[in-house]
Amino acid sequence: MTTTLNDIETEADIAYFLSRFCDQVRKDAELGYMFDEVAKVDWLAHLPRVAAFWSGILLGSGTYQGNPMRPHFELAQKTPISPEHFDQ
């Protein structure tokens, strides 16, 4: 089976990708607990913020407001994050 991969070109593309990506992360035995148990991410609030961040990076929308590194540094202080997590 061949899967056709399309470039991300719209806000809808970003939302689609993030939804699928986050679903997979949450199901992952090594990563899911970081988001659901340690960070206690409110996914309904988080996904639009992440989408705004990537919209700014990929589409130049300028809609993201905030500091994306701060929550990740805070998470790293609560639970170890290793290079292998990023490979996962």
Image (spheres, rainbow, N blue to C red):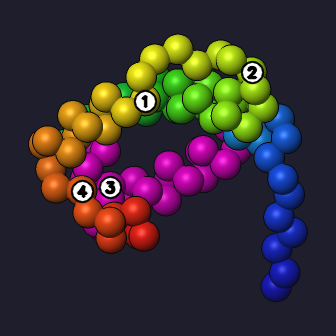
Amino acid type assigned to the residue bearing label 2 in the image? Ser
First in residue order: circle 2 vs circle 3:
3
Residue 37: in sight, yes or no?
Answer: no
Magenta segment range? 15-37
Name which residue type carries label 3. Answer: Gly
Packing grade of label 3 (10 A; few <14, some 14-19, many >=20) is some
Element type where label 1 sits in the image: loop
Q: Residue 5: where, in percent of width, then height?
A: 83, 64
Given the image, on which type of amino acid does mark 4 rest? Ile
Tell me residue 10's x, y (percent). Answer: 83, 35
Whole-angstrom CA distance, mark 4 to mark 1, is 16 Å
Crowding around mark 2 (Cα neighbors within 10 Å: few <14, some 14 to 19, many 20+) is: few
Which residue in the protein does label 2 denote? 61
Residues under numbered marks 1 and 3 in contact, where contact means CB atoms less than 8 Å apart:
no
- What predominant SS class does the magenta segment belong to? helix
Residue appearing at x 85%, y 41% in the figure? 9
Q: Is residue 80 above or below residue 3?
A: above
Q: Residue at x 67, y 34 (%)?
A: 57
Q: CA distance from mark 2 to mark 4?
A: 30 Å
Judged by depth in the image, the label closer to the viewer, 2 or 3, is: 2
Location of residue 40 in the rendering, given as x and y in whole percent from the top left corner: 26, 35
**Comparing marks 1 and 3, which lies closer to the viewer?**
1
Q: Earlier in the sequence, mark 2 or mark 1?
A: 2
Residue identified by numbered label 4: 81
Comes first in the chain, label 4 or label 1: 1
Relative height, residue 18 to residue 43 (above, below): below
Sequence-first disc among 3 and 4 = 3
Q: Please indicate whether residue 5 sits to the left or right of residue 50 in the image.
A: right
Q: Is residue 60 left or right of residue 36?
A: right
